Image: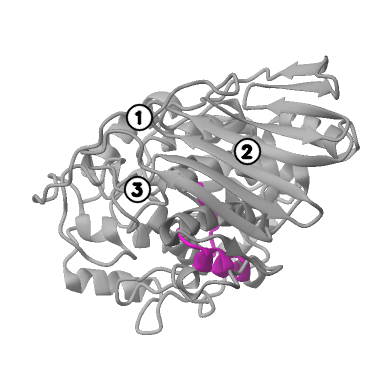
Amino acid sequence: MKKDISHSSSSRRDFLKKSTLGAAGITIGAMGFTAKSYARIAGANDKLNVALVGLGRRYSAYIPPIGIKGNNTNLLYLCDVMKSQREKALGRVKKELGYSPMLENDFSKVINDADVDAVFLATPDHWHTPGALLALAAGKHVYVEKPISHNPYEGELLMQAQKKYDKLIVQMGNQQRSSPHSKEIMQAIHEGAIGNPYLAVAFYSNRRGRTPIQVKQAPPDGLDWELWQGPAPRCDYTFNTWDYNWHWYGWAYGTAETGNNATHELDVARWALQVDYPEEAYVEAEKRHFPDDGWEMYDTMDATFKFDGDKVIKWDGKSRNGYSTYGGGRGTIIYGSEGSVFVNRSLYRMFDRKGKLIKENTAKSKESGVQLGGGGGMTTMHVTNFFDAIRGKAAQRSPVDEGVKSTLLCHLANISYRTGQRLRLNNMGHVINSDEAMQLWRREYAKGWEPKI
């Protein structure tokens, strides 16, 4: 086990230096691939050494595909800024895989290890793009959890980075793209099974309870709060921020429920309607439950996105009201001129225009719905696709641009909520009717952490 490292200001500067950061910010143009890394990119049969970064509720879903013999992978590192998370993950991995990866607190040491071929980023949202850019700069393939970015500007940087490093794979964790029953029904929709698809209603209902009110206190034992903040502006620690509640404590780290969960269903909606950037985006959103608790943004949202060709995507998000409006906790309904489709992580049902069920398919493998962390068959298939794409054995199911476009819908919904404005957009998704909205296109970064290409 490696020794934990406490990050003072000087050690953070070392991190920035090692990771090619500095006054110019995060760059990915200064580093090429090592000969060893490039050999692994080119070799279809070489063992892939991978690292898991962020050991909270999501990492365990990656263990089964890493353990599949045919995927020929080795888990080299478990990395997290919380000591207890590393130790807990080590116990689980040792039990399930039969060996002990190295433990690491410092992300820079992981990506600067030439033996690492690919990293999985299951960190808080504010680390997703900066971490991915650093990993790409070090010649690593990247599997990055949703949302792929913390703000629209970061999504644009990732698309530029993918073009720069076109031999590296970047896959977002929108695992329904790898679901056999979802792929089957999407192909049917695109071939005209329900006529012209014109409306997709994506939904999510959960029963989240009260959130603690933030109280300043010392960071918990074992947490590297300096490195946890990473690209975010520095602030004092508040109780329970690091353990999931960062989602609801303002905009410094999270992207609210829309970024947290709508990413999945909005991606399915875009996939079904075959649309890219909306022409308009507007929302009605508010905090409707527990008005005196610590939750700082909306918990209920109705969002509308209008696209060229009179196509519309709607989002019905209820974080703290578990009423099953559509017959399930999450999913997508696609309406067409000749019929409709209901699809979620478990099944699809196709109906004719009169509402008669004409076809259905239930998934053979299961994937969690609204439970924290998720994990299951779709993730295993999605990660396997990531490995196969690295080796050139399969087409990537979730290219960067698809992840960026779907995540942008989440950002636009949040911007509309924060400004109270109906947004009009150009054909690249930029807001054209509000300077105030464009002020939220990117965030403020801690000095020295500004991501750049």
Secondary structure at badge 2 equals helix
Kind of residue at badge 2 = His
Secondary structure at badge 1 equals loop
**Mark 2 sits on what residue?**
382
Image disc number at residue 297:
3
Comparing labels 3 and 1, the label whose residue is closer to the camera: 3
**Mark 1 sits on what residue?**
208
Q: Residue at x 45, y 54 (%)?
A: 417
Image disc number at residue 287:
none
Q: How far from the left and from the top, in percent, is residue 190?
A: 85, 40
- State how far apart marks 3 and 1 are (Cα): 14 Å
Label 1 Cα neighbours within 10 Å, binned few <14 / some 14-19 / many ≥20: few
Q: Which residue is drawn at 25% across and 69% down?
A: 12
* Residue 278 sits above or below residue 371 on the image: below
Task: Report which quarter residue 399 is drawn in.
Answer: bottom right
User: 53 or 366, which is in the foreground?
Assistant: 366
Tell whether label 1 touches label 3 (CB within 8 Å).
no
Magenta-tinted stretch: 138-161
Residue 151 sits inside the magenta stretch = yes
User: 344 or 292, which is in the foreground?
Assistant: 292
**Of the image marks 2 and 1, the number of the one nearer the N terminus:** 1
Residue 400 sits inside the magenta stretch = no
Label 2 Cα neighbours within 10 Å, binned few <14 / some 14-19 / many ≥20: many
Query: Can residue 103 be seen at all in this image of the molecule?
Result: no
Q: How far from the left and from the top, in percent, is residue 430?
A: 60, 69
**Of the image marks 3 and 2, the number of the one nearer the N terminus:** 3
In screen coordinates, is 146 left or right of 122? right
Comparing labels 3 and 2, the label whose residue is closer to the camera: 3
Kind of residue at badge 3 = Met
Kind of residue at badge 1 = Arg
Q: Quadrant where the N terminus lies?
A: top left
